[in-house]
Image (spheres, rainbow, N blue to C red):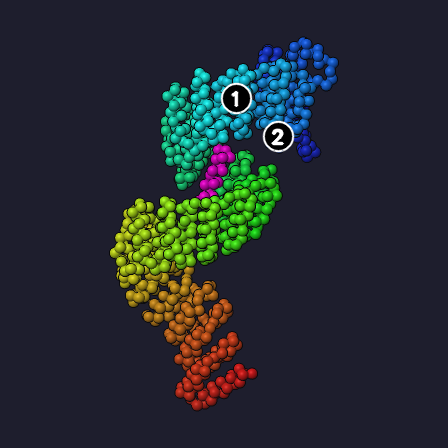
Amino acid sequence: MTTALPHQTPFIPKNPRRNHKKTLTLVVVVACKSKSKNPEAWREERKQVHVDYDKGEHHVQVHVSGLRKNDIPRRYRLRVEGDRFQKDWSITEVVQKILSMDRWDDIEGVLNHWIGRFARKNFPLLIKEITQSGSIEHAIHVFLWMKNQKNYCARSDIYNMMIRLHARHNRTDQARGLFFEMQEWRCKPNAETYNALINAHGRAGQWRWAMNIMEDMLRAAIPPSRSTYNNLINACGSSGNWREALKICKRMTDNGVGPDLVTHNIVLSAYKTGAQYSKALSYFELMKGTNIRPDTTTLNIVIHCLVKLGQYRKAVDYFNSMREKRAECRPDVVTFTSIAHMYSVCGEIENCRIIFDMMLAEGLRPNIVAYNALLGAYSSHGMEKEAVAVFNEMKQNGLRPDVVTYTSLLNAYGRSHHPQKARKILDVMKQNNCKPNVVTYNALIDAYGSNGLIAEAVRQLREMEVEGIQPNVVSISILLAACGRCGQRVKIDSILSAADMRGIELNTVAYNSAIGSYMNIGEWNKALALYKSMRRKKVKPDSVTYNVLISGSCKLAKYDQAIDLLHEMINLNIPLSKEVYSSAICAYSKQGRVDEAESMFLTMKMAGCHPDVVTYTTLIHAYGIAENWDKAIAIFHEMEANNVQADVVACSALMRILNKGHQTDKVLSLVAYVKEKKIPITDALCYEVISASSLVRDWRMIIELIKTLEPSVSQISIGVLNHLLHFLGKSGKIDAMMKLFLKLVASGADINVSTYSILLKNLLAAGHWRKYIEVLQWMEDAGIHPSAEMFRNILFFAQRSIGSEHAAVVQERIDRFLEICRV
């Protein structure tokens, strides 16, 4: 039945402005039966609900009365009748008083003032309430006090509750000690006892101990229940031993104990822990054929496995179905966190924040894992401002940052090129008594290494060793990659020696970093020697290894060695990546083996590896070397037909080939494609357009090119601009040439003597001798001294072409100019 405690009935005030601060609270107590009709009412739990309508909150408390003063034997009642220090507390009141005390306070004094201690039946209820609170130190005090009472009698349920509490706190040895102690007290273990002990070993990852306890249980002629099998399956699954978990599940079915939803969830979790994501999804499909309906935990595991397999669309579909069918499987914090992590992996940070806000809108309170997922998303992209905002929001909501939180924030500063701020986060972390781990120091090493501070990165490696944290292979890989980027060969050798001295075995990733570092600094022989050492130590190379070796060999013009490595990769049945295919095509084309390059390209498409713009560009270069212009154009059109966006490298490569084949009309038509696709103009592209226009003397194309280059004229090299000025002058477009020159001066371009020389030659060829003298003055003003040949050219032109009268004027101006220069 439901009864309401005495309280003021909520009402709506007549004047809401005057009474807006009043709080409307409803208190309701729910009990199953009336105490007068039920003699066992003293052990029943009564739920007390507090509802705050103003804050939109509700709290549920469970009240257990226990046997009171009137229920204990008469001799004990007479004993405490006149003692004012003896209190007739309920069990819930006793537990609240004990929990409010520190573990070193006089807990026994409180218990000795409790009248209910004279009723033996109160002891199991007292242990139940104190263990449900989770405070193991208080529970141990109460249990030791209880065993010293004269009316105490050992019971299996009391020991079972204590064993379960020790299991929750991962105190396996103490739980096993209680198991032997209860037998010394002549208390026979039951199925719940063995279940609790199996659960304790399962939490500690000791699945073999759990199996032995199961065997002891069978020898004691105690039939295992479904909970026993579930605990044992969980013990194996949580340790990553999913095969043993499946064997126990089969044994469970053979013994006539059918699996329930908990069993299925434990098996799915075992697959997830063992990284068997495809098997987990297959098991879930089999589970659909049973009459057991999945719950939120089941779908959370399925979503996690889909994310790990990269099946993001299916994961989102499951998430949306959970939101639509709220009554069946309502998404919880774990669900939203998994989807947020998925968007973080995809690089869609905005969607990650949207999912987090959606979780808040659903009325769910994010935990530390949810905040860490959002913080990690921002950190992986170097968005330190957003990461700091999430960090502050977390602390404002009363959550204490853990080692993952600090590591993510440190990583955010490292990726945003603020290694000093990252170091400050480590200091703050230590001040807040949060011990950094090897992942934290690896993030700090990467923060310094990625910014070129190799010495500081090595110093952090030594510091972590002083702190008692041993560096791992990830630490070495980060340092090797940093040395390769900075081109420090000596550092690479010393880091490899340090790893060998510390007994750190390099894995595939570490070898790839070291080989890539040697390739970056041109040490091909050392890179190949390290690869051979890798094979001798039976470390299996992967696609990245051969990609680094083959592409590095091509860059160093070692094409024969690149092809040998390609054949070795194929013999090892390692799937070729796009980068490897592109490097192989490049190696074949450089050797003039165009047929092999074409064959590799066809093999790539047949293998289901879609060529990208780099692959197409490499094949275009191959056709250019073979002077096969038609095939180069055809492969460019194929790239466009396959929706592969051509970049400036591909366009400039094709233009170079077409110019070489004297197909200038096709070059100029390609310019229209560049404008349509809004491909940025670079030096190479600009040079090819100028070359094609000069061959057909299409000065209109050049004028359009100048208009296109106006916003970014300062980014074009002075060599290309000189070529452009020369073409304009040669075409007789003196005004256009001078306008371009003035734009160069206004943009702050680095104008040299070659630029002025081109300008002067074209002015003189067009007969603009007055402008010629003015440009000479500009040169002097810019700090560039005209050469003697420039003066001889203008004087010779004056004497031959403009008559004696104008020649005298030119001579006068030149003399005046030289006199000013001397001054």
Q: Is residue 170 visible?
A: yes
Front-most of residues 16 and 819: 819
Circle 2 residues within 10 Å: few <14, some 14–19, many ≥20: few
User: How many C-alpha atoms fall within 10 Å of the one at disc 1: few (<14), some, or many (≥20)?
Assistant: many
Work out which quarter of the rendered image holds the C terminus and state it: bottom right
Q: Position of residue 391 (x, y in %)?
A: 57, 43
Please identify the residue farthest to the bottom as the structure is shown: 804
326 shown above or below 382:
above
**Residue 615: x percent and y percent?**
34, 54
Q: Which mark is residue 179?
A: 1
Q: Secondary structure at mark 2?
A: loop
Decide if residue 87 is on the left or right side of residue 130. Answer: right
Tell me the residue that label 2 is attached to.
53
**Left or right of 522: which side holds 76?**
right
Amino acid found under the numbered disc labelled 2 = Tyr
Counting residues from the N terminus, which is met first, the one under dot 1 or under dot 2? 2
The relative height of residue 661 versus residue 230 in the rendered view (above or below) is below
What is the C-alpha distance between the residues marked 1 and 2?
48 Å
User: Which x, y percent locates residue 424?
Assistant: 58, 48
What residue do we see at 63% from left, 14% from top? 150
Q: Is 349 in the magenta?
A: no
What range of the chain is rendered magenta? 331-346
